[in-house]
Amino acid sequence: MPLGSFASVGFDSKRQRALPIPKASANMKTFTPDSSIASDVIPSANYGERNKGRLPDMIVLHYTGMPDVEGAIAQLCTAGTDVSAHYIVLEDGRIVQCVPEAKRAWHAGVASWAGEEDINSCSIGVEIVNRGHDWGYPEFPLRQIAAVIALCRGIMLRRKVPSHRVLAHSDVAPSRKRDPGEKFPWHSLANSGVGHWVQPAPIVRGEALRLGTISDDVSSLQQALAKYGYSVPVNGKYDGSTMEVVTAFQRHFRPVRVDGVADHSTLTTLQSLLASLSADTKAAATG
Ligand SMILES: [Zn+2]
């Protein structure tokens, strides 16, 4: 039986490019996709059990960051690479599932969010096919984004993932990762109910906190970032790791300028997010 036998529903297979299925995956046991809009299953060899049966309540979005889709699928599915993701979203909007949601895929690496370090155990990993910063970083096609939105909406409903736990790989690993990057249209996702977003505050001239600043204002910034979930030291020093976290914050929430400088717009956007987060939490507690 060919893999991808689920694929016949919903699209014209003659017009689609065949999926590059790694040889090893063709011999692996397939499974029923968790998402009804996943058109194909390419089983990955790389996964394990979630720690202590932790149920996933987070979605981590990635880009593949490789020059071609064939290489990306091989990387995520072939034994020995030690990386995988639950889903791959192709540029044409097709969704491939590689690891069952119940299992722990290996996508986040060394990471942290809201005090939790085993991000692979608490999350669903979604790889979005895009060459990434090292290979020209093209725009994400609309139909690919529509597929990401539909996929995430389903996961959020099934797994009760709150909006503020739909995150970028760069949010949970700011010192190592840039994906899915500042071209990723988080505002479009939020318009469809996926992810937490407020309109970024406009950029204005004025004072800013930057690398080397030591002050109480830096402590306040660090506290606010930590309260939102970022792993950042609270020591009043605008050091290298603080700058990396501010950069990750900007890639996600104030993408028009990603420079690691905490200007007025960055600080105001962060405060607005925190305010809307506590409003959301109160609504959830009473709702
Ligand atoms: Zn990633």
Image (spheres, rainbow, N blue to C red):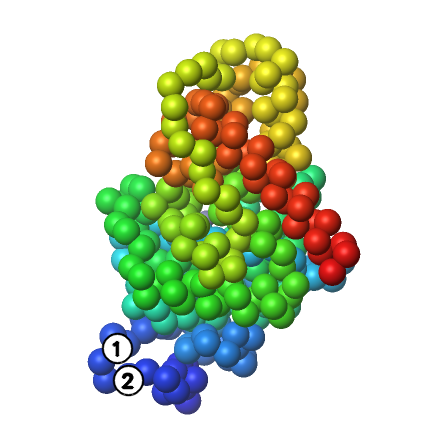
Residue bearing mark 2: 12
The answer to whether one can see residue 245 in this image is: no
Q: Amino acid at mark 2?
A: Asp
Q: Residue at x 52, y 27 (%)?
A: 267
Residue bearing mark 1: 16
Q: Confirm or deny contact between disc 1 and disc 2 (CB under 8 A).
A: yes
Which corner quadrant of the image does residue 216 belong to?
top right
Percent position of residue 128, x then y: 39, 58
Q: Residue at x 46, y 42 (%)?
A: 199
Q: Amino acid at mark 1?
A: Gln
Percent position of residue 61, x then y: 48, 53
Percent position of residue 18, x then y: 28, 76
- The one nearer the camera, 79 or 10, is 10
Relative height, residue 257 to residue 285 (above, below): above
Q: Residue at x 63, y 56 (%)?
A: 162
Relative to 135, 174 lies left or right: right
Which corner quadrant of the image does residue 22 belong to?
bottom left
Percent position of residue 68, x then y: 27, 58
SS at badge 2: loop
The residue carrying pointer 1 sits among few (fewer than 14), some (14 to 19) or many (20 or more) residues within 10 Å by Cα, namely: few
